[in-house]
């Protein structure tokens, strides 16, 4: 009899775990209450990047004179944009459903919860159905965090999920939160024509990133008219009827037409019956005990945002794959564990920002000796051809062995270019391996070979 795998949550992790396990011979049931593909992915990630892409095209048109073109100013058709976002998300969900169906996965629409360590119950509009499982995966994602001083209404005070797109383009948007999500919203709405103020609780945007990287982004923001309120911690927001006022801890106040909260997310673990199944929780996050994403109950796994690891769709997808392989016994052969320190990530601002592996500041903080090489895109022919010489490539390597430990890229297509360094970091390649590779000319990737010399 085939192994019975039940998955609660059909985001990137759940879909990948389902399809991989089904291909390996498991009988798989996937329970999803909202959108197959993940709310965070299809209601957040995809629409936000689509809106950013629209803003980029507007910028390309506005700056086309550099390339010898004359064009009329482009404007945003909000309804056409809204329709495109809905079509993108719906199309991706259909693809996920078709993939699951083709692999023989049973898809159950409803809210799942664990009744005990081997039983999952799905509630679809009051209709209950139970499934017995040999193994269970919980991958229920997360939701935007709302502070106790804010009361989002979806009109003036917005969470991230109210903004794809909002009911109207804000005249003046006040963004609370200067992490990855916050700066992407600044990029999105400033490029679409809104005035934007960013409340920065510390002294630089992206406080967890390389200061050189943050400096390039801050310069771009200031150049496009974004107001940066540094050292300010928001403690309240008031809807005035025709606008908002955001209050800061130090007494400063910011007036705008809309306020957007971009201050993190909360894992969806409530009401899942994890305690009934014997799964230990710590501070609202599931405790994982090994590299295979198992909880303290060996046949119950967690993945994605509820795992407390990196909240990236790429990480969740890989977790789902690794869980399926472990459930089906493939870990007993050659198997590579996930190394979260080597995960590549990107921020879709303009210029784009991407990094992987060890950061320069982190190396210096622990007294580790590293070799740092940096090459500006302005030295490459392709950047000059494209009329966008902003940014740089930075590579961090071991001075003794030449092994690439990490890197940062700021500039056009950084999210694509970082893949080269991600492969290098994951496989302990040396700078000479990159420097001696024959890349295309003219291409932005030539900055990678230059930085590796």
Image (cartoon, helix red, strand yellow):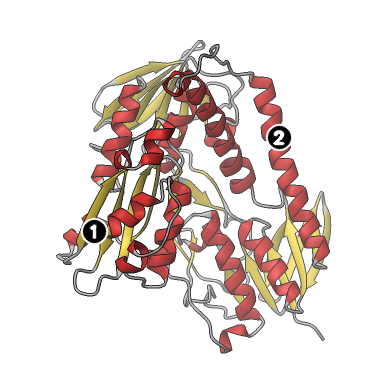
Tell me if residue 127 comes above or below residue 287 in the rendering.
above
Q: Which secondary structure, mark 1? A: helix
Q: Earlier in the sequence, mark 1 or mark 2?
A: 2
Residue 362 is labelled as 1
Tell me if residue 352 comes above or below residue 268 in the rendering.
above
Percent from the top left, x then y, of residue 433? Answer: 36, 68
Percent from the top left, x then y, of residue 143? Answer: 55, 46
Q: Counting other residues with Cα less than 10 Å from the Cα at mark 2, is it few (<14), some (14-19), or many (20 or more)? A: some
Q: Residue at x 24, y 33 (%)?
A: 231
- Relative placement, left or right, of 25 versus 300 is right
- Relative placement, left or right, of 243 versus 232 is right
Q: Which secondary structure, mark 2? A: helix
Mark 1 touches mark 2? (CB < 8 Å): no
Q: Give the quarter of the image for residue 105.
A: bottom right
Q: Residue at x 57, y 89 (%)?
A: 332
Is residue 149 in sight in this rendering? no
Residue 86 is labelled as 2
Residue at the right extreme, as displayed: 127
- Relative placement, left or right, of 97 versus 393 is right
The quadrant of the image that shows the N terminus is bottom right
Is residue 143 in sight in this rendering? yes
Q: Counting other residues with Cα less than 10 Å from the Cα at mark 1, is it few (<14), some (14-19), or many (20 or more)? A: few
Percent from the top left, x then y, of residue 326? Answer: 60, 80
The quadrant of the image that shows the C terminus is bottom left
Q: Residue at x 48, y 55 (%)?
A: 311
Residue 385 is labelled as none
What separation in Å lies between label 1 and label 2 (alpha carbons)? Answer: 41 Å
Q: Give the quarter of the image for residue 48.
A: top right
Tell me if residue 17 comes above or below residue 228 in the rendering.
below
Question: Of residues 266 and 409, which is closer to you in this image?
Answer: 409
Q: Residue at x 17, y 59 (%)?
A: 364
Question: Of residues 34 and 238, which is closer to you in this image?
Answer: 34
């Amino acid at each position: 009899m085939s192994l019975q795998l039940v998955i609660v949550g059909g985001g990137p992790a759940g879909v990948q775990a389902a399809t991989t396990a089904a291909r390996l011979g498991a009988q798989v049931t996937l329970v999803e209450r909202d959108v197959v593909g993940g709310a965070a992915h299809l209601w957040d990630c995809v629409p936000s990047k689509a809106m950013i892409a629209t803003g980029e095209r507007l910028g390309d048109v506005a700056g086309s004179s550099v390339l010898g073109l004359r064009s009329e100013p482009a404007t945003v058709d909000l309804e056409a944009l809204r329709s495109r976002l809905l079509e993108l998300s719906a199309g991706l969900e259909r693809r996920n459903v078709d993939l699951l169906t083709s692999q023989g996965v049973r898809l159950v629409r409803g809210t799942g919860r664990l009744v005990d360590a081997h039983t999952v119950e799905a509630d679809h509009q009051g209709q209950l159905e139970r499934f017995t499982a040999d193994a269970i995966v919980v991958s229920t994602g997360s939701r935007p965090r709302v502070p106790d001083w804010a009361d989002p209404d979806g009109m003036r005070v917005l969470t991230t999920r109210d903004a794809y797109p909002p009911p109207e383009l804000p005249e003046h948007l006040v963004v609370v939160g200067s992490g990855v999500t916050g700066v992407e919203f600044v990029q999105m709405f400033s490029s679409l024509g809104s005035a934007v103020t960013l409340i920065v609780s510390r002294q630089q945007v992206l406080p967890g990133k390389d200061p050189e990287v943050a400096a390039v982004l801050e310069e771009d923001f200031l150049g496009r008219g974004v107001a940066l309120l540094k050292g300010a911690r928001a403690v309240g927001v008031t809807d005035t009827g025709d606008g908002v006022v955001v209050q800061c801890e130090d007494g400063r106040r910011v007036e705008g037409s809309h306020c957007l909260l971009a201050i993190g997310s909360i894992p969806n673990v409530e009401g899942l019956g994890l305690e009934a199944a014997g799964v230990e929780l710590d501070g609202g996050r599931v405790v994982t005990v090994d590299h295979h994403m198992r909880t303290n109950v060996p046949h119950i796994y967690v993945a994605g945002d509820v795992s407390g690891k990196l909240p990236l769709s790429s990480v969740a997808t890989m977790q789902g794959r690794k869980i399926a392989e472990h459930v089906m016994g493939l870990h007993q052969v050659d198997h590579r564990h996930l190394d979260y320190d080597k995960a590549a990530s990107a921020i879709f601002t303009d210029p784009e920002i991407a990094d992987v592996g060890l950061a320069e500041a982190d190396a210096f903080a622990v007294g580790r000796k590293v070799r740092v090489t940096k090459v500006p895109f302005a030295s490459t022919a392709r950047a000059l051809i494209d009329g966008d010489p902003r940014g740089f490539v930075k590579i961090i390597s071991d001075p003794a062995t030449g092994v690439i430990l990490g890197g940062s890229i700021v500039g056009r297509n950084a999210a694509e270019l970082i893949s080269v360094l991600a492969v290098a970091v994951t496989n302990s390649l040396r700078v000479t391996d990159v420097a001696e590779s024959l890349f295309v000319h003219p291409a932005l990737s030539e900055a990678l070979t230059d930085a590796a010399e």
